[in-house]
Image (spheres, helix red, strand yellow):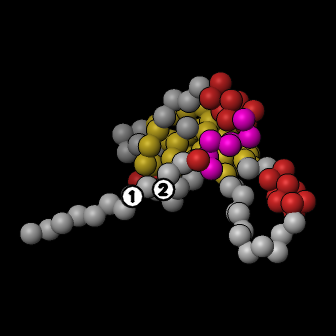
Amino acid sequence: CVMTSDGRLIQGTLIGYDQLQNLILKDAMERVYQLPISSNDGHNNGEDDEEEQEEGVLELVPLGLYIIRGDNVVMISDVKNEIWDEQQKNQFKEFGKAQPLKPVVQFIN
């Protein structure tokens, strides 16, 4: 699984790399997460909310054989398929419970 500098999450089988960290993945797929937006305007009825949540939170975009330039690579990780399967089985309910990240601030004297 590779995270790129623009935030894309690409999973596939690593079949090649070089000294510049250029990567070649086979059977690559981009994992696109789309969390449902909750609106609190009071104009929604319960049926609309249920339909939006039934839509897929995860979209897998097939890429096939894929080359990623080394300067775009942020992180490379080995991923167990059981983790992905468990997330899909739970319908990504844990994602909505996450706390927002605090901003990173650098003080220069």
Q: Position of residue 23 (x, y in %)?
A: 50, 41
Amino acid type at mark 1: Lys
Labelled disc at residue 102: 1
Q: Residue at x 65, y 24 (%)?
A: 82
**Residue 61 x %, y %:** 73, 49
User: In this rendering, does residue 66 appear at all?
Assistant: no
Instruction: State the residue at coordinates (59%, 47%).
Output: 97
The residue depicted at 67 percent of the width and 51 percent of the height is: 33
Magenta includes 26? Answer: no
Q: Which mark is residue 100?
A: 2
Instruction: Identify whether 71 is placed above or below 27.
Output: below
Say whether residue 5 is left or right of residue 13.
left
Dot 2 falls on a residue whose secondary structure is: loop
Side of 74 where 86 appears, left or right: right
Q: Residue at x 59, y 25 (%)?
A: 80
Which quadrant does the N terminus fall into? top right
Give, as a single range, the part of the protein colored magenta: 90-96
